[in-house]
């Protein structure tokens, strides 16, 4: 929706009224063919990836009620009360992390994790490498259709906490958004 800057202040954001049904509206989604639903899911995922990997500015509350389905099966995002930002360095690190996972590179994953987490005590590098290997073993063999981003993020965050690390806030915020989506 378009922002109406003449009526917007630092405390109030005024936008166009969006009347399209949201993704959680079962009746609206049931009108779509399976092929259209697949295309819609791809569009949402692709758009969200673009937001944080290319734009560095993303919707931090991407639940189904905040994504509208337009008449032409496009999407509109609403409710921009929670937004996140990523620096180019953070985006590069995320890309390195993804590539390490895809390549099954536990050492590369460990290096990335050390970039996005602060140790709360002495670092047990052997345990962190073992944890990285475990993440890769658990998620690398899963086909894309059944890949569970939420499970990956929850496992990653839990594993890092158990290993004595605090994750950078940007990764926690992004992880929350990915789990929601």
Image (cartoon, rainbow, N blue to C red):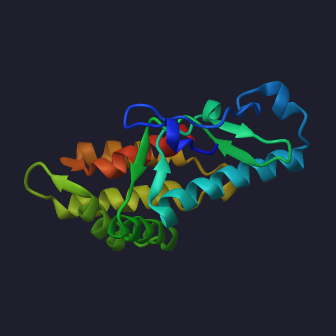
Q: Measuring 48% from the left and 51% from the top, which residue is drawn there?
A: 58
Between 17 and 116, the residue placed more toward the observer is 17
x, y percent for residue 99: 47, 72
User: Which residue is at a point 84% across and 25% down the rendered structure image?
Assistant: 27
| Side of 54 where 69 appears, left or right | right
Q: Is residue 143 visible?
A: no
Which quadrant is the C terminus positioned in? top right
* Viewer-side residue, 23 vs 148: 23
Q: Answer with left or right where residue 56 lies relative to residue 2.
A: left
Residue at the outermost front position: 6
Residue at the image position 35 percent from the left and 64 percent from the top: 87
Q: Residue at x 51, y 43 (%)?
A: 5
Q: Nearer the viewer, residue 60 or 125?
A: 60
Taking the image as drawn, is residue 164 in sight? yes
Position of residue 5 relative to residue 107, above or below, is: above
Nearest the viewer among 161 and 57 is 57
Q: Which x, y percent locates residue 72? A: 85, 48
Is 131 on the left or on the right of 24, as rendered?
A: left
Image-quadrant location for residue 144:
bottom right
Q: Position of residue 80 (x, y in %)?
A: 50, 39
């Amino acid at each position: 929706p378009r922002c109406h800057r003449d009526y917007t202040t630092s405390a109030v954001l005024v936008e166009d009224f969006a009347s399209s049904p949201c993704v959680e509206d079962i009746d609206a989604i049931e009108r779509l063919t399976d092929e259209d639903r697949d295309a819609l899911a791809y569009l949402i995922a692709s758009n969200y990836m673009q937001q944080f990997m290319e734009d560095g500015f993303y919707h931090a509350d991407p639940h189904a009620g905040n994504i509208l389905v337009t008449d032409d099966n496009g999407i509109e995002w609403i409710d921009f009360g929670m937004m996140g930002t990523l620096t180019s360095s953070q985006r590069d690190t995320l890309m390195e992390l993804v590539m390490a996972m895809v390549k099954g590179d536990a050492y590369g994953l460990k290096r990335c994790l050390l970039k996005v987490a602060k140790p709360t005590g002495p670092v047990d590098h052997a345990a962190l490498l073992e944890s990285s290997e475990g993440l890769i073993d658990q998620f690398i063999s899963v086909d894309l259709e059944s890949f569970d981003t939420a499970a990956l993020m929850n496992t990653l965050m839990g594993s890092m906490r158990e290993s004595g690390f605090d994750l950078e806030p940007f990764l926690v915020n992004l992880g929350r958004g990915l789990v929601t989506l």
